[in-house]
Amino acid sequence: MTEAESPSNPKTRLHLSLCLLLLTAGMLFFSALGRSPLMEPDEGRNAEVGREMMVTHDWITPHFNSFVVLDKPAVFFWMVAASLKTFGVSEWAARFPSALMGVATMLLVWFLGRRMFGDSSGLRAGLIFAASPLALVLAREVIFDMTLTFFVTLAMVAFWLAEENRYLAPWFEALMFAAMGVAVITKGFVGFLIPVISILIYQAARGRWRVWLRLRWGWGILIFLAVVLPWFIAVSLRNPDFPPYAIWNESLKRFATGSARRGGGILYYIPVFLAGFFPWSLFMLLAGWNRLRRWRELREEASRPILFLLCWATWVFVFFTLSHSKLPTYFLPAIVPLSILAARVWQDVGADGKKRAPDWLTAGFTLLLGLGVVVAAASHSWLYAWAEKRMGEKIQPQVLQLIQPSLLYAALILAVLGFLGRRMAARMRGRTAAIATFALATVVFPVMALRCYTPWRLYAESHSSRRLAQTILASPLRDAPIFGYYYFRNSLPFYLRRPEGLLSIHWGEMTSNYQVAHQAALRRAGDDRAGRGVLITVPEFLTLAKTSAQPILVITPNALVENLFENAKRIEPLWSEADFSVWEIPPAGASGTETPPGRVVPPFRPILSGGSSR
């Protein structure tokens, strides 16, 4: 803590900071957490893996749709399963681990920012992280990235504490290696590579290579292996094909080739940074430009925290830019050091009570004002009409009609906040200016997101299987076997609480690379375990349709309805959505329509609109 910031009652300040952080996290991460349905495909798949782990009590081998899936390690699934066991099977319980890890990561950001730059910067850093778009979204979804980010952050914080104590406190190093171990069995070797190479770059930038050797690498690697190996050995003994798959397919091949089909150019993460860290990304770019001439100061001891954070954020950016597998969510670990850096930058606001705010602050709010005006104008221009036409291929009409007004109002909100911020920066001085402008910047994204919540929720409903499952469970056919026809709804098994069959050639519709490779190997070997009547081929499907004593439900993309009729011959329409429909194949011997179906449009019965969890 800096002398200038020393409060008369440090404990009171500490408690107030914690209360404000926890209150903010509660509102942003937990409010209406279970209201939206599980999205396709990732949320539905990950929640179902946790549910099946809870039901089967198999804590070693993850399963999805009753089949082994080893695309990702087990830690996150353990957390989801424990949450479902504790709170019941619901969207809220499935998302609770990510929200909890969001709170924990925010507290680590606060702690590290406080250690580096003082109480005020720590509080700002925690609030910046919580209100950043990428952190806010990923803390509310059933995916791995927030949990990975927590353990990577914990490793980096432990290293910083070890260095602060001149490597005389071995428990900090033990914590660092243990955290990296848990990160690895959360999402793979990236949990080791991000912290280790970030630290190596940091020491190299300081010109202190030998300090790197002061870490207790021998004991550290033993602790790391003690965390990683028990699960790795156990799952490998049960699934001998897992080690080569994990090391080659899910690590080296994914990084070095485009096999994951998630490619992107060298500039991929620039818009991710700008949008995922909005609006702080704008302020940081402007403030960084002002400091560019002082880059040599980074090697000074006083700038050691800034250099550490810059090396951390830069390595995350470079690592995933080099990777041939790219997703916006991968950038989340960089939001942690960026949040602390943004908080440090804000220390300049009001540092001298008599001077006006720095130019970068005024310019930043001016950019927000201009961006709001441009987006508002674009929402009623030919540009939006062009974008709407392209979006219409993937977004349902009832969602599309809400996007334009929501975009307009969100842009106007942005413009108003930018205008207010600019006036505050120009007229206020000292601590008042720092607090007012920071509070305004903090609410920018949450307020805009709140305005866009209704179209987002409708979009989520149209990209989830909750309504479909409610329709099936409310019908007389609730217990009938159900198959996807070259089509798979990943969240449907979670809502139905039973497997969903899939007719396919390679079974890639399940979005599991492991299952594709595993099924191919089993069928080549003529293994009886292949498919088990759930993953089937066309000949197996035709046999089932001709011999089944009960009706069969088939979900198919609307473009494949005629192909389904050519194979099954007898199909009856049940329900439809914009891009898929559900058909019934009557039991063997029952009469059914043998007329080719027309184009799949209403008036099929629409899928019921569903309720929500807590």
Image (spheres, helix red, strand yellow):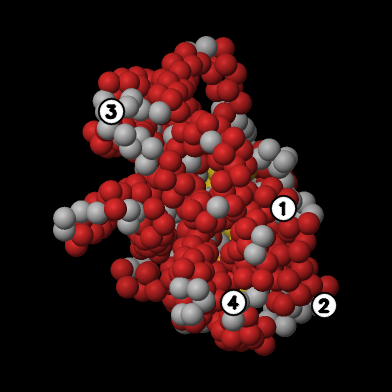
Q: Nearer the viewer, mark 3 or mark 2?
A: 3
Q: Quadrant of the C terminus?
A: bottom left
Residues at marks 4 and 1 touching, judged by CB atoms closer than 8 Å: no
Q: Nearer the viewer, mark 4 or mark 1?
A: 4
Q: Nearer the viewer, mark 1 or mark 2?
A: 1
N-term mark: 3 or 1: 1
Q: Quadrant of the N terminus?
A: bottom left
Give x and y (percent) for residue 389.
59, 22
Residue 97 versus residue 205: which sits nearer the camera?
Answer: 205
Q: Could you give the CA–CA distance between mark 3 and mark 1, rounded to whole angstroms?
A: 48 Å
The residue located at (55%, 52%) in the rendering is 300
| Element assignment for label 2 | loop
Residue 582 versus residue 427: which sits nearer the camera?
Answer: 427
Q: Could you give the CA–CA distance between mark 3 and mark 2, rounded to whole angstroms?
A: 79 Å
The residue located at (62%, 33%) in the rendering is 598
Q: Could you give the CA–CA distance between mark 4 and mark 3, rounded to whole angstroms?
A: 46 Å
Label 4 Cα crowd, 10 Å radius (few <14 / some 14-19 / many 20+): some
Q: Could you give the CA–CA distance between mark 1 and mark 2, rounded to whole angstroms?
A: 34 Å
* Residue tagged 2: 525
Residue 245: which disc?
A: none
Q: Could you tell me the amino acid type at mark 4?
A: Leu
The residue located at (59%, 42%) in the rendering is 295
Q: Which residue ends up furthest to the right in the rendered image?
A: 524
* Residue tagged 3: 354
Give x and y (percent) for residue 159.
51, 69
Q: Could you tell me the amino acid type at mark 2?
A: Ala
The residue located at (80%, 77%) in the rendering is 526
Q: Nearer the viewer, mark 4 or mark 2?
A: 4
Give x and y (percent) for residue 13.
20, 56
* Residue tagged 1: 323
| Element assignment for label 3 | loop
